[in-house]
Amino acid sequence: MNASTSDTTLAPAPTVGHYRIDPVRTTSAVLHPASIRPRCDLGHRQAARIRCQRYQALSATVHAVLDAARFHTGYQRTPDGWKFAERLRGQIPRHHAAGGLSAWVYSRIRTGFSDQDTRTKEDAMKIFVAGATGALGSRLVTLLASRGHTVVGTTRTPSKADSLRAAGATPVVLDALDRDAVIEAVTSAEPDVVVHQLTALTGFTDFRKFDEGFAATNRLRTEGTDHLLEGIRRLPVRRIVAQSYAGAGFFARTGGLIKTEDDPFDPDPPAAIRRPAEAIKYLERAVLEAEGIHGTVLRYGGFYGPGTSLGKGGVFLEAVRRRLFPTVADGAGVWSFIHIDDAATATLAAIESGRTGVYNIVDDDPAPVAEWLPALAAAIGAKPPRRVPAWLARLLVGEQGVVMMNESRGASNAKAKRELGWQPAYPSWRSGFHVRLGTAATRAA
Ligand SMILES: NC(=O)c1ccc[n+]([C@@H]2O[C@H](COP(=O)([O-])OP(=O)(O)OC[C@H]3O[C@@H](n4cnc5c(N)ncnc54)[C@H](OP(=O)(O)O)[C@@H]3O)[C@@H](O)[C@H]2O)c1
């Protein structure tokens, strides 16, 4: 079911947006402390801050590279030195292991620390991230700050202000449903770009109450979007990049299994998905058709990785571990995934490229439930998922559960790769699940 067969090769075009980077020279430069320097002629304090952020990011990267290398080679540190862990041998397809690792290392280097970075001080932007503490918002803030952008990040929760500050953003405590407060926050920040990452999905676990679980998010996608747009209309530079969805359950259930940005959403979704789907369509229309505003819509696939429901301790990952996430009927529904760090680098690429329009932000490997769910269970050392017939699933989780597991469609990332110059570091969930969620990741943690 691979949409692309090239997910094992190192990305040939070393660019992010319009910045060209030489991976070989960058690799050696990156490992030298002298390379941790700001990319342009900035003031002393700002330069020191950037140097510090880059050092922290570099240190995290080096550790992550070692973790991944340890997993892929099968060697582990023991009291007697480095030993080959026999039980890792043969657990992952070699081509995925090699491709996943090299692409991932390359992407880490590409997005953060290049000596070849040709941007100037004038390229740095002021970016207002609405929803800066969410699964994606928090990764994005760190990435934007590490690129030298000035970030203003919002949260509803005063106690999260310090963590936003530590990540490199100026915190703003804000209820996105308060129109006047949003307009005031946006206009006083005067950003070059507003990034809309507002959702309220923490705690959403019950597929039977899908509509209820999405009610607050629906409001953020309708009223919240309107409030941000009202603020942006008062700015000299008017640009918004907003979160939409290309995961399971929203594309039309007819025609091909892999959908592009031109393919329609489901015109007749199950009742419980209707309002969430309407809210998503509302957001997309509002952002793309707002007069005088440059709008970009990023339709992310299903998130996995830190802070997500398919991350360490996440509700759906735990459900898979406990065999509470079954395959329904023959599991023919196709899902598209994206690692949360790849979602962040795609968002960065969209912001810096200045492109408008709709982009699917997914990996290269849309796959049916019958394929990815047992692979996920195996990666985390769980027993294979149970299988339930459609009639029973309908009783247990409702029609929307059956549709998502059995009829959903995946998405193509060709446009995002072509126009944003973006490559996912995890081109396939096959390597991503193993490296970031699997037993090796747990041991390394
Ligand atoms: N494509 C996908 O698969 C996808 C997309 C979205 C979410 N999810 C999943 O949903 C779960 C939760 O998502 P999440 O981590 O992004 O957290 P979340 O609870 O959905 O919150 C996201 C952001 O929105 C903010 N927010 C929520 N309501 C707000 C309001 N009324 N006014 C202002 N800000 C508000 C939150 O601020 P606070 O700091 O106040 O909480 C936070 O910064 C995760 O497991 C994630 O993986 C998946």
Image (spheres, grey):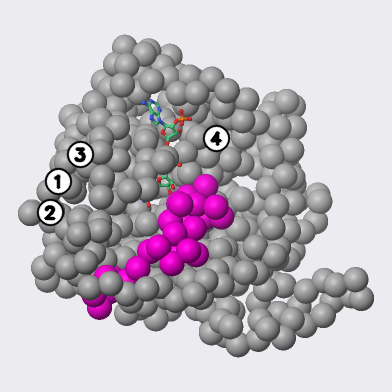
Q: Depth check: 352 or 156 in front?
A: 156
Q: Earlier in the sequence, mark 3 or mark 4?
A: 4
- Which amino acid type is shown beneath numbered disc 3? Ala
Q: Is residue 348 left or right of residue 25?
A: left
> Which sits earlier in the primary sequence, circle 2 or circle 4?
4
Label 3 vs label 4, nearer the camera: 3
Total numbered labels: 4
**Which residue position is annotated with label 4?**
149
**Marks 3 and 4, how far apart in space?**
30 Å
| Side of 415 where 211 appears, left or right | left
Q: Which residue is mark 2?
A: 269
Kind of residue sitting beneath label 1: Arg
Label 1: which residue?
Answer: 274
Q: Upstream in the sequence, badge 3 or badge 1?
A: 1
Of the residues shown, which amino acid type is indicated by label 4?
A: His
397 vs 123, nearest the viewer = 397
Q: What amino acid type should be assigned to the residue bearing mark 2?
A: Pro
Span of residues in magenta = 307-334
Q: Mark 3 vs mark 2: which is more N-terminal?
A: 2
Give coordinates of residue 262: x percent, y percent. 17, 58
